[in-house]
Image: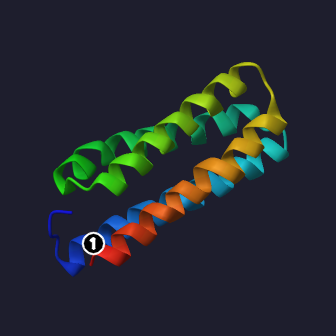
């Protein structure tokens, strides 16, 4: 991974933690059947992940690239299931795929710095 200083590393971790919080709120909205709000929250999550693309490319780390690919795949799966209003499947993908991968990104960044 390209070296980044502690402050940059912490900022990146804080952004990802915010995305984790947004994802947890998204889960809550899905459980409460507030689909309109859930879709808006999901859109914010997707936008956040998209904004991380240039940062991950700059860091040039294979582990992060792999995790980003997994995150992108999870988001695509969630979008497909949201379209079909399969709430349980959305929750399953979020809990067992999206959130663990976001947490792994934090672990990788902490390990590298």
Colour logic: rainbow
Where 100 sits versus 27, above or below? below
For the point 53% across and 64% down, the residue is 103
For the point 76% across and 44% down, the residue is 91
Question: Where does the image place residue 105, in percent across and percent down from the top left?
Answer: 43, 61
Question: Where does the image place residue 10, in percent across and percent down from the top left?
Answer: 32, 75
Q: Is residue 36 left or right of residue 89?
A: left
Q: Is residue 84 left or right of residue 77?
A: right
Q: How many marks on residues?
A: 1
In this rendered view, identify the residue nearer to me: 84 or 3. Answer: 3
Question: Where does the image place residue 12, in percent across and percent down from the top left?
Answer: 32, 65
Q: Which residue of the protein is positioned furthest toward the front in this rendering? A: 62
Dot 1 surroundings within 10 Å: few (below 14), some, or many (20 or more)?
some
Q: Which residue of the protein is positioned furthest toward the top in this rendering? A: 84
In this rendered view, identify the residue nearer to me: 66 or 92. Answer: 66
Q: Quadrant of residue 84?
A: top right
For the point 49% across and 66% down, the residue is 17
Question: Where does the image place residue 4, in percent across and percent down from the top left?
Answer: 17, 70
Q: Quadrant of the N terminus?
A: bottom left
Where 89 sits versus 8, above or below? above
Q: Quadrant of the C terminus?
A: bottom left
Where 2 sits versus 32, above or below? below
Q: Is residue 4 left or right of residue 71?
A: left
- Which residue is tagged 1? 9
For the point 27% across and 51% down, the residue is 56
Numbered disc 1: secondary structure: helix
């Amino acid at each position: 991974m390209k070296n980044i200083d502690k402050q940059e590393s912490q900022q990146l971790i804080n952004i990802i933690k915010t995305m984790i919080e947004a994802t947890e709120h998204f889960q809550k909205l899905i459980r409460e059947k507030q689909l309109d709000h859930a879709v808006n929250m999901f859109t914010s999550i997707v936008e956040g992940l998209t904004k991380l693309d240039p940062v991950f490319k700059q860091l040039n780390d294979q582990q992060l690239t792999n995790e980003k690919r997994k995150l992108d795949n999870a988001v695509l799966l969630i979008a497909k299931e949201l379209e079909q209003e399969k709430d349980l499947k959305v929750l399953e993908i979020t809990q067992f795929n999206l959130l663990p991968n976001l947490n792994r990104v934090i672990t990788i960044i902490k390990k590298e710095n």
